[in-house]
Each structure stands twice: as C-alpha cells, then as structure tokens.
Image (cartoon, rainbow, N blue to C red):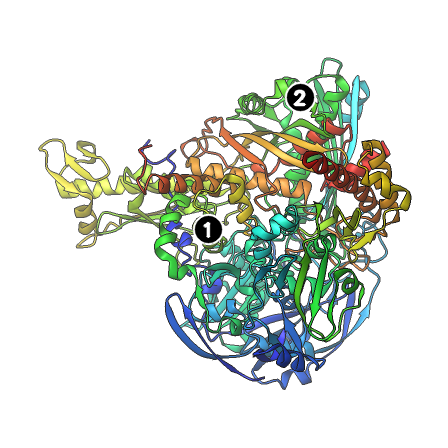
Amino acid sequence: MTKIQISLTLNGKKVTEEIAPDLLLIDFLRNHRCYSVKRGCETANCGLCTVFLDEKPVLSCSVLAARAHGHTVDTLEGLQEEARELGEFIADQGAEQCGFCNPGMIMNAIALFRENPQPSDEEIKEYLAGNLCRCSGYEGQLRAFRAYLEYKERGGAVCAQ
Amino acid sequence: MLKIKEYVRAESLSQAYELNQKRSSRILGGMLWMKMSNARIGTAIDLSGLGLDQIEETESEIRIGCMVTLRQLETSETLERVSCGIVRESVKNIVGVQFRNLATIGGSLFGRFGFSDVLTCFLALDTYVELYKAGVMSLEEFAGRPRGDRDILVRVIVKKTPGRQVYLSHRNTRTDFPVLAIAVSSGSRGVRVIAGARPGRAVCAAIPDEWKERLDGSACTPEEMEKLAGELAGKIPMGSNMRASAQYRSHLACVLIKRGLLRLQKMQEEEG
Amino acid sequence: MRSVGKPIRKKDAQALTAGKPVYTDDLAPKDCLIVKILRSPHANARVLEVDKSAAEQIEGIEAIYTWEDVPQERFTLAGQTYPEPSPYDRLILDRHLRHVGDPVVIAAGDSEACVDRALKKIKVKYEVLPAVLDFHQAKDNPVLVHPEDSWKSLCPVGANQKRNLCASGESCDGNVDAVLAECDVTVQGTYHVKAVQQTMMEPFCTFCYLDTYGRLNVVSSTQIVYHVRRILSTALGIPKAEIRVSKPRIGGGFGAKQTSVSEIYPAFVTWKTGKPSKIVFSRKETQTASSPRHEMEVSVTIGADRTGRIRAIDVYTLSNTGAYGEHGPTTVGLSGHKSIPLYGSLDAYRFVYDVVYTNRMSSGAYRGYGATQGIFAVESAVNQLAQKLHMDPVELRMKNMVREGQVMPAYYGEETNSCALDRCLVLTADMIGWKDKYPCRDMGNGKVRSVGIAMGMQGSCISHVDVGSATVKLNEDGTYLLSIAAADMGTGCDTILAQMAAESLMCPVEDVAVSGADTDTSPYDTGSYASSTTYITGKAVQRACVSLVHRIRKQAARMLECRTNELKFDGSRAVNQNNGRTVTLEQIGLASMCDSNHALQVTKSHSSPVSPPPFMAGAVEIELDKETGHVEILDYAAVVDCGTVINPNLARVQTEGGLAQGIGMTLYEDIQYNSEGKLRNNSLMQYKIPSRLDMGKLRVDFQSSYEPTGPFGAKSIGEVVINTPAPAIAHAIANATGLWFHELPITSEKIAMGLLEK
C-alpha cells in the first residue's frame, strides 16, 4: 500500500496529511474531530454523513479522502452560525428528536436553501429525500423549515406569535 | 471492505488507459457501488482531473463527459430541453441529492446495471458512447456487451434527433430502485420502448411491423394502445427479485407502456 | 401551570442541532481496541473446530475468543426486571449456533483493518444441522432450537424448550364459545405481521474501560443502564458492584436498545484484557443480529348481535421469538391484552397464545411490543364486521368502545380512570372528513380515493413491576439538579421530567439541570421502556420535588426563625409572614452547605399497581392506483388521549414518528428470509424505511383525559402512536378495492395482483 499526501481545505483551514489510498472521507473527517459526521449505513442510503465537497452536498462515506485533495470540505463544525440559526427553528418544533440524523439533514438543508432560497414543500421533501430520519422528524422538520424560510423572507425578523 | 493499494489521479487518458490494463486496476466513477464491494483494487484510477465533468452542446449533439454527475444531468437545461425532461425524470428518484452529486454517468453506464434508470433513459435517446480505445458506438451496442473490458468510457454523446420521450417507473418507495422502468420514445427512429430493471439489464422491445404505421399515424385508440402494450409486455423477459415477481413486472410493463404511448400521443397532439 | 403543558425546547436541542460529539462512538477513547464478531453463516450448526492460529499472528491483534473461552452460565439479553420472564438461553459465545448471524468468534485488535484481516483468516468447521425456519412448524418439531439442559426459565410462563416453546398461556372471561354461537354475525381472520426492524439511525454501539478502581465501566447506547449492569454481571460472572453502566445521548432506540445487543462483547474483552475496547455494529449487523419485532400471526373471531353490539372476541396468537427468547413471553401478552379491551362491554373474551423458538434472528422489543400486531388484527376484524353489518365503522365503534369508568376484564381487570377515546374518535373522523369521504370515490382516471379508520391503546408502565426514581437536589446557587436513570433516546424525557420538576419546585425549567443515566450516580430506574418514563419516573420526580420543597421550607424556617406554616415559599424566596423577613433560594442553598445536618436532596421511587392505557384514533385518506396498485397516503389524522400533555411539541413529534413507523411497516418494510434462513434485508438499501416522500401529510391533535394516578394527570404516549396505521390503511385499501389484506406489508404488487385475480 502506497501512502499518499493530500492537502485540502477543511472548514476553512488548510490540512495536509499522509493517508492510506482507501481511507474514506468520513473516517478522515472523524479523525479530524469532525464528529458531526455520522455513519448510519454501508450502502449510501441514510444521508447521515453528508458534508460539502466544493460546496456541494455529498455522502462522505462514498468519497475517497484522496479525491478531496486540492478541494474544499465543509462539515457542520465549520457552519456553526448557519446551523445555529436553522437549529433554533428545529428546536422550536422538537423535531431534532434523537438528533443523530440532524447534522447530515441540516447540512443538506443549508445546501438546499443556498441553491433555492424559496423552495416549496415538495421541493424540500425531494431535496432532503436522501436524509432518513426514523424518529421521524419529517413533519416537524418541514414545519421548522417553513418557519425558518418565513423568518428569512422577513429579513431575519422574528414574527410575534 | 474495499481495499485499494494505490491511488492515481490520471494526468491523461492514455496514462489512465495504460494503468487500467492490469486486471487489478479500476477506473473510479462515483464510487457508490464500488465502495460497497469487497473488491481488492491494485490501482484506483481517478479521472476527475481531466475536465470530463462538462456537458457541452454542439449543433447536432450533446457531449457529456464521463465524470458528469447524475445531479448535473438532472439540473441541465440543455438535457431537459433535448430529452423532453426524461433525463431529469429518470434520475430524480435515485436515493438523494448527495448521492446524485457523486454518482457519474460514466459509472452508471459502464456498470450496465440491471436496475439502472440511467441506462434505461439514455437507451430511449439517440445515444452513443465514446470509448478510449474502441471509439464511438451506439449505447445499445455497448449495453449488449459483457462487463469487464478494460477500455475507458470517456464521453456519452446524445444526438439531437428530433423526437419525443416519456419516462415512467414504478418504485416500492420513492427513492428505491425501480421495480420497473419504462422509457418510450418516438421520432425518426420510429417508436421505441425500453424496459429497465426487469430486474435484468434494460432492453429495447421491438414494435411489431403491423403496429408501426398505425403508431406513426397517431390514429390509435386507447384500447389499441393497451393491446399493443400487452403484446410488447408479453415479449419482454422479466425476472423476480426482492422487489417484485416476474408476473407483477409483466403486468406493470403493460400498464406503463400503455401510459407511455398515450402520453406520447398526447404530446404529439398538443404540438401538432 | 407554568411549565407543564408548555412547548418547551428540548434541553439537548442546541447540542444535537449543532452536531456536537455527544453519542457513544464520539466519546470512545481513541486508543481503544476494536471489537468485531465473526458470525454464523448457518441457521443451525455446531462448531466443530476453530483454527485461529493464522489470525493471532496478525500484527495488532490483541485477542481472539471462541466458545471455549467464555463462562458457561446462561442468561438473557432482555432488559427486564429480575426475575426476567425471558428464559436464560444464551451464552456469550455458544458452540451451538442457532441463526444466521449468531456470534462464533470475538476478535479484538488495535485497528479495524487488522481485526477485519483476522476475521478473514479464522477457519471454522461447522456441522450443519437441519433448521426450523417456519414458525408454524416449530412447536413439537423434532429439531430443537434449545436442546441443552442448561436452558432455564425463571418465571412460570408456560415454557418448554423440549417442545420449542418459549411461552404459552391462556386467559378468558365468560364462555366465549357459547357467546359466539349465539351471535348473529361473526367475522374471523388471521393476520400476519413480520419481524420488522426498529432501524434507529444510530447502530448499536458500546465502549468499555477499567476505571481507577479496576471497575468495569460500560458506556453504551442503551435504554436500560441498570438491566445492562445485571445482565453483564450474570454473563461475565462478576459482582454487580464491579460494573458501572452509563449512557450518553442515544441516536434512537424504539425498543431495540431495551435488549443488551452489543454490550457483552466489549465488556468481555475489556474484562479479560484490562484494555479499553469498543464495538460499533455495522448496519448489516444492526439489521441481521439484533432485536426486531416479534413476527406474529394473530387469529381473531369477533361476534356481534344484529344491532352491532360486539359481544365476544376470541384471539389466538402464534409468536415467533426466533433463536432466543428475549421478550418472547411478554410481547405476546399485549397482542390480546391491549387489543381486546378496546371494546368495553363484551360478554366474553378468550386469549390463547404460543411463543415458539425458530432458527431465525432473535426478536426483542419494538415500540408497540405486541399490541401493534394484536391491534392490526382486532381493528381489521372490527372494520370487516362493520361491513358485514352494513354499519358505518365509526358508528360501530362509538357503540362498543371502552369508556371511562369501565372495568376491562381483558386488561387485568383494571378500570379506566381516564379515557377520552370517544372524543378522539369523533375528532379524528371529523378531521379526515369521514362523513363525506367514506368509503371511497372514483377519481375517474384509474385512481380511487378512500378512507380507513382504527383505534389503538397501550399501557403506561408494567404495573406492579416498573420502578422509577428521581433524586433532586438544591445547588448553592438556587438551581436544581435532577438525577434520573430513565433514558432520553430522543423522546425528550430529560426535558419533560425537568418540566415536571420545575412545576413542582415553582421555578423556571432552565433552573433544573438533568443528569443521567448512570448506575453509579442515578437512582434506580427500570429504564425507558413499556411507555413508563412519563408516567412512572414522572411521578417519582413529582414526589421527590414535593418532598424537597418541604425540606427547603424547613431550612428556611430555621433561617427565618419561624414555624414552617408561618412562612410562604414561592419557589424563589421564603417569607416569614409574621415579620416580612425573607431569604432567597440561593441563601437557603448556601445555608444548607454550612453547619447543616439537613441535606437538601431527596430521592423518591415510584411504582404503580395500575397501567392506565393511553388511547387514540387514527384515520387515513389514500389514493390508490388500481392498475399499478400504488398507494399514496394523502392525509393521516390522529387524535391521542395521553392524559395531560406535558409538552405539546414533543407529544406531537412522538405521535408523528409513531405514525411514520406504522406507515413504513404497513406499506414498505418487507422482511424476507431465503430458504437457508438468511435475512435478505441486511441494509438500508434492501430494507426500505419511509423517506419524507413516502409519508403524506400527518395531522395530530390531542383530547386529554385526566389520569388521577399519573403525574399532573399524564399517561404515556411513546408506543400507542404506532398502532393505528396498519389497520387504518388496510381498511382504506379494502374500501378502495374490496380486498382485505391480512399480511403486512401491503405492497403495490399484492394490491395489483389481487385486483387482477378478482
């Protein structure tokens, strides 16, 4: 096995490291204390390990760390501000429940809202279809997203309830 | 678990091709299927540095690099226009956005998987693949070949052949593999019906000669369409797996082909 | 009330939505040994020989254990109060392998890679034996799943391992045969629910280490810290005093983690090697070697008179516990005891059951715990009865449902102190638009829209068994610490219990910190299962707080030099009403820590002689494609009576979650074994739980009754919510197609092919 050196930008910081060629990005990230990145399956179905690779949401369980060489990777650890803002709305519904799917789901929701700031319910469901939640989560999360999007539309002002 | 001895980001296609001649070498696509395997790979060859992640439009064709992701296919306005929306329709249910941001058209077609929505969809279009060594051939010919050759699928070429297409699939859950996928197209190549996820590899069901004219004339009644759909469905070999039985697939084929033909007819009427 | 009944955010919400490292695998020591299991490829086999010599040579391998290395005392992995009804039928590693996935070898090493390599190098010779795979053929089969003499049952549950019987029993009231013979109308049916998986997002995970005192510390994703301590003590043959079990945040449980699925392996490794170790189950292991729902076949006969009075219900349940008996003897009981009592004025009932061993994966506890299977059967039969009587199923239920103040003979003779089931049903029917939509309407495009309805119930604890405890102490800054051993697995019980504490202590919820669950520091609690936490532990919290307030008042009286009845305490200060002198709570807290003989800390335990059922009604509207058989859920309306709703947000998401799982079980989750007894649904690719596109719209409301024995009038909610989707959706499908389906899941294939045959 030939170790290879990779350099990437992880959560805004440059990281250089020697790695095994078959190291998966999820393991690389957890080794770098990005514990928000969770493993829930081996078949690329659950969405728990969602991170951004060059700003696009991907499943870090299915990316070789080697492939991230020269690229930018962001995890929820690097998006704490955005996550906190959205997280408040999820918390207001109690929709985080067990929380295990939250990091991946919030990452993908952030990706959606960056791509499409005014999605319909159907668009939200379609974009997040690859984020499983067994608690489930789905209805409460949708209420949270709606409330969040309304808040954003009002320019970030909280409406008196 | 997948084991890889060496990782090479190829600097040219020729280098990639040379490296790939070893039996233990593999070209990396989106890695989604490969990662699930227990393969022991000598050299993993990454084509991601070769600029093959572009969709280019010329006057007569769309050229899709092998590293273009399913998500790129899904959001491409060019393909939306040229394919009557079936490219988007065929990939939008595949697992999730994060999955589709990784899965590539090259990996999907090179694998010639039985469950493949992508293969089913592109067989309905006038599609060719460009292989590094073997050159350009129709997707149909490529799909008929066995897996395991050591060539590299470089590009997928979709001719802008005028026509209409419809894509229909049935799934047990929305993001699951299809139980059956049916693509129906009409155009200068006549009416074509592709059946994928049978669960075997997608095939094209030949339209019987006596039906060809009637279909072109768009004079078929819904009852006739149903009859034709039944005839075609009866000829498509189906199998059973965890998702459904062969009998149900045959029944579904009849339903989906009928719906596809009717929708084609309606599209024609709306345009005409 | 200030805190109870308020939609307060969960205390851990910020950490969870920010992705903080709060789960077991996030917290495991980085240098711990990696533990993995080599599992049986055969459904029934004996290990003849294990050659581990090559594996032991691999660099980084610490230890490889086989059946020869483990204690020979049998135990159960079921998280139940001692003496467990589940038989003692397991060893850590057994020479006799009883299902595909049964552990053969435990390997531990420095890295995943070296342990993986070692597992590949281990050569095992098996003697493959004939297997019992069909649970219909298990009872009295010549092939015995547990032929061993060391098998034992601690409780009289009608077990006989020489007949492959894990349990059997009968209960009745009145003469059911005679009453059924008199009935004008009867319906009969047999309903099959498969061994569906909880599929919590966090796989099973445990790490262990020895502490300063050489005690075995076990940190695990578990609902049952105290039971795990006892199970490990029995299995390892070491004193309970040598073991500490705690749980961090849990990534979902739904009952799966009421069985000690993963703890035993790293515990054994750490105890033997002295080194920290961890196991993280793969999803494949979580799917194939865990603790799913008991497969059950429930046969129901219901009889009624011409006017629609339901007079008798007769239930026989055949339950498949798989290779081991975890929760086998108890889940089956709920299939009758929590379905039959939905109907309040029966002349007779009978409930008979057998629980059999087979060479399939062992079953366990999954939300609903047998009630789900029973209610699918009974409620489906009631819907068929309505059809046969030409009565509206809502009307039939209004006429027959259990009411407040009734005695329920099939529910251990308990009386319903609180029951708003009638209001639940009326509101549910109203929400779905029953009057306009029942039974169906043809949409004219090959599609039919139809509705279906069902009721459900559960319990709020195991009466006379479950114990909940709470310790509340006043800190010197005037805030409180609440210690519990109930397990918040996403349910929000930390928050709900803090709300109850805050209500009792007259303080803001923010002033109550919650700690647990940890067998060293938390007071005893049976754990979070059987829908008991709100009802049982909640009451313990309330009692502990009331007692602490009493002590605070005493301390204040000493400080204010008056009698307790002369002072007023409002939660933040105490006032001597004679002279207006005041002490703050902070001053009281400080005073208790200087020259004081009075601890401002109280522990209370609570147990209940009754288990008041929560009730609910659920109704669904579907659109069914008659050609493809596809069912689209358009709308699901559910109304729950969980007594007082402690936190409306959390009660709502619990309900939505239960409905989602119920929908998954009803339409999609299809457990399939091959002819060799191998489970084919070994991944999330082959076991399809609903995505957010497969759900339709869920609408939830509450109709509260007041349960006098519960804290603030509360009952449970965690489990009841999974029970209505199966019968309601099956009903809607019948209303759309005329076909009654008796087996879950009801796939589009079954519907389409059924319609073709019609």
Q: Secondary structure at mark 1?
A: helix
Real-space CA distance between mark 2 and mark 1, rounded to the nearest whole angstrom: 42 Å
Instruction: Report whether C726 appears left or right of B221.
Output: left
Q: Which mark is residue C438?
A: 2
Pointer 2 indicates a residue of which chain? C
Q: Which quarter of the figure has residue C722? A: top right
Q: Residue C534: x and y, percent?
A: 46, 40
Q: Is residue B93 visible?
A: no
Q: Residue A103: x and y, percent?
A: 46, 55
The residue type indicated by label 2 comes to: Tyr
The residue type indicated by label 1 comes to: Glu
Q: Nearer the viewer, residue C497 or A9?
A: A9
Instruction: Report whether B49 appears left or right of C379.
Output: left
Q: Nearer the viewer, residue C568 or C196?
A: C196
The residue located at (78%, 42%) in the rendering is: B257
Instruction: Report whether C214 appears left or right of C354.
Output: left
Q: Residue furthest right?
A: B210
Q: Residue furthest top?
A: C307
Q: Which quarter of the figure has residue C311? A: top right
Pointer 1 indicates a residue of which chain? A
C453 shown above or below C689: above
Q: Nearer the viewer, residue C13 or C146?
A: C13
Q: Nearer the viewer, residue C295 or C216?
A: C295
Q: Is residue A144 visible?
A: yes
Instruction: Report whether C484 appears left or right of C441.
Output: left
Q: Residues within 10 Å of mark 1 (few under 14, many from 20)?
A: few
The residue located at (68%, 41%) in the rendering is: C667
Q: Residues within 10 Å of mark 2 (few under 14, many from 20)?
A: many
Number of marks in the rendered image: 2
Instruction: Please say if the residues under marks 2 and 1 sit with CB atoms less than 8 Å apart.
Output: no
Quickly name the residue at label 1. A115
The residue located at (88%, 48%) in the rendering is: B235
